Amino acid sequence: MVVQEKARRAATRPARAAPARASILRGTVQVLGELLITAGIILLLFVGWQLWWTNIESDAKQSAVIKEFAQGLGGAMPASPKPDPSAAPVDYGTPAVAAAPVHAGTIGIMYIPRFGPNYTRPIVQGTTGDVLDTLGLGHYANTAMPGAVGNFAVAGHRQTHGAVLDNIHTLVPGDKIYVQTKDGYYIYVFRNNQIVMPSRTDVLEPAPTRPGVTPTESFLTMTSCNPRFGAEERIIAYALLDSWQPASAGPPAEIAAQVAAAVRGN
Amino acid sequence: MYGWIFRHLPGPLWLRILTSLVLVAGALILMVQFLFPWMSGFTAFTDSTIGSASQP
């Protein structure tokens, strides 16, 4: 408006050329300024989108995946049997090992009580963006499946897209990590953290960080970005298989409520 | 620029305000659907995998 007003005033003056040029200059500066302000707003919106909105989108997607998986189990998930404190822990023998699903197929659900009572995240085959950015924890396709002797390795975002492993640094040795598949429940016990450079693929070896060694135990390895809000390094969490129980035995008591909630879809 | 666009929208004031809101909403949808996912490829802090073969 001001520009127009001045331009009109300038037009009534006898000497036209100089004010007209000034008006063009003013208009250019104004458009440039508005474009720069727009770019700034877009960048702020992008930050908000990445740090906040992607979490909401991914959480919704992951809840849907969990619900679908849990309901797909159907009758294979009986109610948790009444815990009998006097009973000795039952040994169910060698864990069942399922065949790896196709890319983006659901392997199971991970429960980590240390991350809060509602920590229920899907484990999906593959570690490409389409899996990690929406579906949750991605299973490195060339590593073992849950329960197998070797290394069951998964990756997850520390921030954005659900931030599935945001609290990976809070794990304490001895913490239980539950993996539920269609076959049953695999109970891993957290052992230690390690912070490495992103190129350290040896953490995915069947015996983690020991290439060429034949594994004798079942490992769970989780990788995520480090530091939080950065990706200069990777934080690795190692866990060892402690025990397993088939689906027919019902869920372990510690996660029974969460397993039931997953079937209900919340 | 925005002033120029607003002045050149057709209709009475309330319609022009409504049209601008629709334009802003459309721009937001385009950004969330296409621009931001593309931009996120340039931010590094979402990389959580080991190695480079599977890196999105």
Image: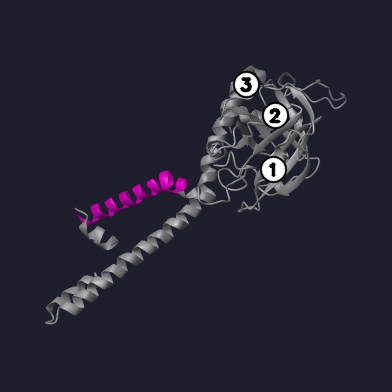
Instruction: Note whether A261 is above or below B32 in the view shown.
Output: above
Give the x, y percent position of residue A28. Answer: 28, 68
- Judge whether residue A170 is colored magenta: no
Give the amino acid at mark 2: Ala
Cα–Cα gap, marks 2 and 3: 22 Å
Is residue A116 in view? no
Tell which circle, 2 or 1, labels the residue nearer the N-terminal end. 1
Tell which circle, 3 or 1, labels the residue nearer the N-terminal end. 3
User: SS of the residue at dot 2?
Assistant: loop
The residue under label 3 is: A73
Instruction: Note whether A98 is above or below A168 in the view shown.
Output: above
Which residue is pictured at 31% across the width and 68% down the height? A30
- Judge whether residue B12 is colored magenta: yes
Cα–Cα gap, marks 2 and 1: 24 Å
Q: Using residue B2 as the reference point, say whether residue B56 is left or right of it.
A: right
Segment colored magenta:
B11-38
- Report the front residue among A131 and A251: A131
- Look at the image and tell me in which quarter the C terminus of chain A lies: top right
Marks 3/1 same chain: yes
- Quadrant in the rendering for residue A97: top right
The residue under label 2 is: A144
The residue under label 1 is: A115
